[in-house]
Amino acid sequence: MSSHPDPRALGAFLRARRAQLTPRDCGLPTTDTTRRVTGLRREEVATLAAISVDYYTRLEQGRVRASTPVLATLTHALHLDEDQRQHLYQLAGRTDDQPRHHRQTQRMRPAMRRLLDQLTHTPALVLGKHLDILAWNPTATALYTDFAALPAQHRNYLRLMFTHPAIRGLHKNWAHDARDAVAALRMEAGADPDDPDLARLVGELSVRDTDFRTWWAEHRVTSATYGTKHYHHPLVGDLTLDCDTWASPDHSGQRLMILTAEPASPAHDALRILTSWAAEQTEPASAKNTTR
């Protein structure tokens, strides 16, 4: 890769590419207001890429050199194809060490899998980097949604809190719970602020949800590993559950999230109903079709 990038050429490419896109192309809200520029505005690209408008402006003006993580987020924000992506990195004089289509897969630890399999009467999830949902048990499916039916790239706890209507509606205190989840991600981001996957997640949610954009800008952080969740489930009604998160001892960042109820409480009975319903849904077809 060239060690002598041309910042003016990079700026010209960025300007040309954003001129080719419309807000609708990128999932941005549209208005009836007459636009003074063709294509996307600088601030819209900056929002999509989760970088400041000032930083993006300096990129276009050739006054700053783009880092590799920023190039990764710009690839996503500007909807670049493979050839355009390679051209972007060449202009910036950078090596694309982790192409977007080769995103590293998070692998669940076998011990986490065993723990999850043994939790048969309470909802449980295994969370990975950036609150990605790596695995779940049937009761978690009954409580939240059928995670297996979702594209793998959409299985993120925070993303679903903001974009999945059923999961958003499940939380009786959604604003409180969602704000706490944003603070947890913000805490995690401090350890690796240049991660391109994190930048893509933040950029997407910043564009799609005003509350996320506001709460992310607050820089509030939390490392809380326990709390209380208040849900309203369409099948069993109201549930008050204790939520505990247990970190893997190997520093992999993987966590086991478990939701439990006080014994003999209405929520405990509701979980038994959900567990029974989940078992019926996962019962082999041959058993379901057996004549009784």
Image (cartoon, helix red, strand yellow):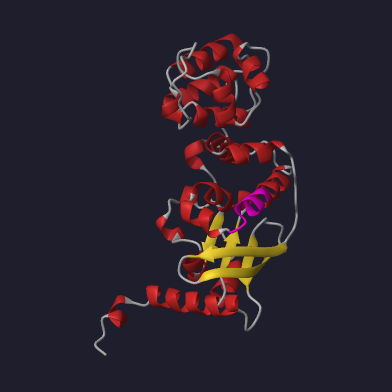
Magenta highlight on residue 171: no
Q: Residue at x 55, y 51 (%)?
A: 161
Which residue is situated farthest in the left direction here?
291
Residue situated in front as seen by the camera: 242 or 284: 242
Image quarter (top left, top right, bottom left or bottom right) of the N terminus: top right
Residue situated in front as seen by the camera: 288 or 2: 288
Residue 250's x, y, as percent?
71, 61
Q: In the figure, 272 relative to 149: above or below? A: below
Most common secondary structure along the magenta stretch: helix
Residue 77's x, y, as percent?
51, 29
Residue 247 visible to an observer of this rendering: no
Residue 14's x, y, as percent?
52, 17
Residue 122 sits in quarter: bottom right
Image check: 228 left or right of 172? right
Residue 74's x, y, as percent?
55, 27
Magenta highlight on residue 175: yes
Image check: 55 left or right of 33? right
Residue 280 sits in quarter: bottom left
Query: In this figure, what is the number of numbered marks?
Result: 0
Query: Which residues fall within the magenta stretch?
Result: 172-179
Image quarter (top left, top right, bottom left or bottom right) of the C terminus: bottom left
Residue 195 visible to an observer of this rendering: yes
Q: Residue at x 52, y 21 (%)?
A: 88
Q: Residue at x 47, y 51 (%)?
A: 165
Q: Residue at x 56, y 37 (%)?
A: 200
